[in-house]
Image: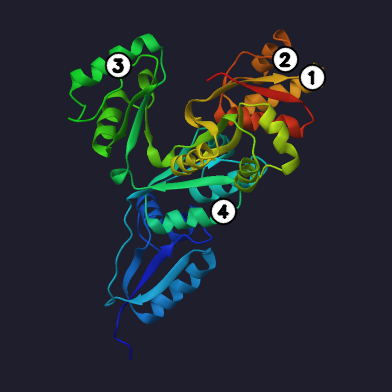
Amino acid sequence: MDTNTYRIVLNSMGEAGVALVRSLRPVIRSTDRELVEKLYQAPSVLLDSLDLSTAQQVMSVLDETGADFSLESSNDEFTPGAGTYEIAISVKRYNQIAEVIRVISELIGTDVKQALEMLTRSPSVLLSKISLATVEVFQKRLEGLGVDIFSSQPAEAYYDVFYSGPAENKPEIVRSLRTLGVVPTGLEINTDANSPVICTGADFDFASRLWGYFGSGEDGLAVLNQNYQTFDLQLIEAKESDDLKDYLAQHFNIPEKVLPKILSTLPVVVMRSLSPTQLADHMLALSGLEAQCEGHLTTYQSYNIELDSRESADIKRAASTLALLTDIAESQWETDIRNSQGKPSTSLNYHQGRWAAHELKQQGIRNKLRRLA
């Protein structure tokens, strides 16, 4: 007779999502909040000190959920997952958005509107206080869907602080920081009113105090995890050469027949959504090829969209698309488009602009984006 006892361990959510909580309710006496924590901070012990027969019965039920479970002896050493990670996402291609939304909804239980709001930010933190095992599930489930997936341990990350409000107010923001005493000794503060940068390379403690004092986005102050920053690489000037053409073709997938046109219409963005490391590597390589480049942080880019068509049906479709991606009503967009002869003045952020341009193009509506900042 087996007198040992057993535990059931959730190794990861696997092919399941947050709906797994519903499957666990009849099996485990815990609150939904506790179940969600076990789910996102896997590996976690669901049940312990079970006899073998009972453990096998429970496993037979749980194996149908698609999550990754294991049956272990209660005497075995166990290391629980730690909720020290968070995960963020940034869209690179917009042709698989519907599938991205479906997967996100399954993983975290958002509705379509909430998922759209997340995806129009740059980038958007999907979940915090999760384990490495959960990060790996997200990466696997979203792989190949045209998105960048970032993970970070916030307590170990570094942060950049930006001010996006009126330039004349920046000195007052800087004075407030100093008066509140939140600026660590040795951290250099940029006081140039014309620069959006407050400081770079701040630690988590400083970032947390800023969030505590100013909130999220209040007063135009933003604290960005360096691990989540993405940049567009713009080629400003270049001396045409075979080596430069080879580099552009090889690293940026620019067709050879298009290269002459690209190099004759500078400045032009040659690659989007690069990490800081990728940006630095490309800029160094291109400088060696006698090319001048700039990196533009996507977070603060804004655009106007201009429509070539004046057809009533196209205007209505465009207004519907723009309303979906913003918090502005369709009727207001339609009025703005008509009154501005296809050049509405409302600005769109990086993802709203590029996403809208893609959707309108798919509908056969010619358009172009005009960058504002």
Residue 43 placement, left or right of 155:
right
| Numbered label tally | 4
Q: Can see residue 278? A: yes
Q: Which mark is residue 173?
A: 3
When asked about the image quadrant of residue 224, the answer is top left
What is the three-letter code of the residue carrying label 1? Ser
Packing grade of label 1 (10 A; few <14, some 14-19, many >=20) is some
Calculate the distance from the C-alpha at mark 4 to the C-alpha at mark 1: 36 Å
Mark 1 lies on residue: 309
Mark 4 lies on residue: 143
Mark 2 lies on residue: 342
**Mark positioned earlier in the residue sequence (4 or 2):** 4
**Mark positioned earlier in the residue sequence (4 or 3):** 4
Q: Quadrant of the N terminus?
A: bottom left
Calculate the distance from the C-alpha at mark 4 to the C-alpha at mark 3: 41 Å
Seen at 21% across and 27% down, the residue is: 183
Packing grade of label 3 (10 A; few <14, some 14-19, many >=20) is some
**Mark positioned earlier in the residue sequence (4 or 1):** 4
**Mark positioned earlier in the residue sequence (1 or 2):** 1
Disc 4, disc 2: CB below 8 Å?
no
Q: Judging from the image, what secondary structure is the residue with disc 1 in?
A: loop
Query: Residue 38: horizontal and vertical position, in percent?
Result: 37, 57
